[in-house]
Image (spheres, grey):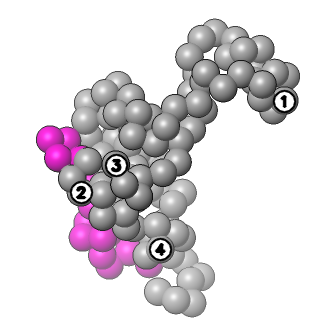
């Protein structure tokens, strides 16, 4: 998928190569999943293909709330500012859209909102 970059470390086994070589020596590369593979793995778990749509640039100050909502609802938070994400998520269920569902929400103390 063009323009779709990133990835993350996953917990593949009980000791994760002895905590990624004792906390960040990080020798083994087999625990790193590419962005698309990681998202497919996340969406295929307890999330049940549910995701929360947000735009990182517009909703940066709401990230703590978005992550909390994702944990409570078993959904995967996905930054939709990448146009490739729309096609990638075809067949998955948008359980929450921060841009519409929280359109009137204001972060306390925010000058910009």
Q: CA distance from mark 4 to mark 2?
A: 17 Å
Magenta-drawn segment? 89-106
Q: Which residue matches tag 2?
A: 86
Crowdedness near tag 3: few (<14), some (14–19) or many (≥20) residues, C-alpha within 10 Å:
few
Q: Residue 46's image quarter? A: top left
Q: Which residue matches tag 3?
A: 1
Which label's residue is closer to the chain start, 1 or 3? 3
Q: Which residue matches tag 1?
A: 25
What is the secondary structure assignment of the residue under circle 4? helix
- In screen coordinates, is 26 left or right of 98? right
Callout 3 touching callout 2 (CB < 8 Å):
no
Which label's residue is closer to the chain start, 4 or 3? 3
Q: Which mark is residue 57?
A: 4
Residue at 57% across / 90% down in the picture? 111
Residue at 44% across / 35% down in the picture? 38
Crowdedness near tag 1: few (<14), some (14–19) or many (≥20) residues, C-alpha within 10 Å:
few
What is the secondary structure assignment of the residue under circle 2? helix
């Amino acid at each position: 998928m063009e323009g779709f970059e990133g990835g993350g470390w996953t917990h593949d086994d009980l000791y994760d190569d002895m905590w990624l070589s004792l906390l960040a020596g990080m020798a083994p590369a087999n625990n790193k999943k590419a962005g698309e593979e990681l998202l497919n793995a996340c969406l295929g778990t307890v999330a049940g293909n549910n995701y929360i749509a947000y735009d990182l640039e517009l909703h940066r100050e709401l990230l703590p709330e978005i992550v909390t909502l994702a944990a409570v609802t078993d959904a995967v938070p996905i930054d939709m500012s990448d146009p490739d994400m729309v096609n990638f998520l075809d067949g998955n269920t948008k359980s929450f859209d921060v841009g519409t569902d929280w359109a009137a929400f204001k972060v306390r103390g925010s000058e910009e909102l």
